[in-house]
Image: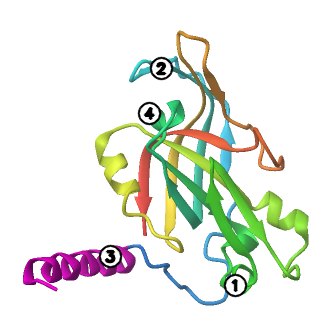
Amino acid sequence: MNKKLLLVLMCLLAFGAYKHYQHRPVVHGVGEIAPDEPLQTSTGTADIQFNGFTLTPLAEYSIKARVLSTEDYSMGTEAELSPTDLALGWGPMSDEAVLSKIKITQGNRFFYWHVDEFPIPQREIEIHAANTHIIPANDSIRRQLSNIRPGQIVSIKGQLVEAKRADGWHWRSSLTRDDTGAGACEVVYVTELTVS
């Protein structure tokens, strides 16, 4: 193997190790670390013109939650608005003792979970976790999204929205935390994001 190829392989391995280290999960130990329910209130905010889309605020929304998983997207209309989905958990779904028994994945704009044995009732899992499509209001928030790790706590403020485009495409947020399946995700125009 020539020296140039060896150097390239070593750089690739170092980069992979760095990315893995940078995105490793944060472990907190037993106990709920984000105990409060999301807060949703009515809104009087006018439509927002955003990158060729019209965002109609449906409700003011704030949440402090544990990041269960993250997934980045670069293809499709939704990715033009929302480059990242965060699977978020609060209450019992922010407790390491519960989460250690649940396998969580994301893909195709959905959040999936699987258990061999329920650590808490199924309905408690369903109403204390959500897949959240994040529309960052500015470049600072967009940059923060790329560094969020599972296990971190995020505080999000913004609006649940319906996004529309002139060609008829639309994407509407859920307005309840107790629904499941297609259409149950929150679509959030995020104006404030704090990560800890």
C-beta proximity under 8 Å, tags 3 and 2: no
Q: Earlier in the sequence, mark 4 or mark 2?
A: 2
Q: Is residue 190 above or below residue 128?
A: above
Q: CA distance from mark 4 to mark 1?
A: 34 Å
Q: Earlier in the sequence, mark 4 or mark 3?
A: 3
Eye-nearest disc, 4 or 3: 3
Start-end of magenta stretch: 1-22
Q: Earlier in the sequence, mark 2 or mark 1?
A: 2
Residue 100 - label: 1
Element class at badge 1: loop
Element class at badge 4: helix
Q: Nearer the viewer, residue 109 or 95?
A: 109
Q: Mark 3 sits on what residue? A: 16
Q: Position of residue 172 (x, y in %)?
A: 67, 29
Q: Is residue 12 magenta?
A: yes
Element class at badge 2: strand
Q: Earlier in the sequence, mark 3 or mark 2?
A: 3
Q: Mark 4 sits on what residue? A: 80
Q: Quadrant of the N terminus?
A: bottom left
Q: Residue at x 52, y 71 (%)?
A: 150
Tell me: 121 left or right of 187: right
Tell me: 162 left or right of 4: right
**Based on the displayed image, in which of its 4 quarters is residue 147 positioned?**
bottom left
Q: CA distance from mark 4 to mark 2?
A: 10 Å
Q: Mark 2 sits on what residue? A: 53
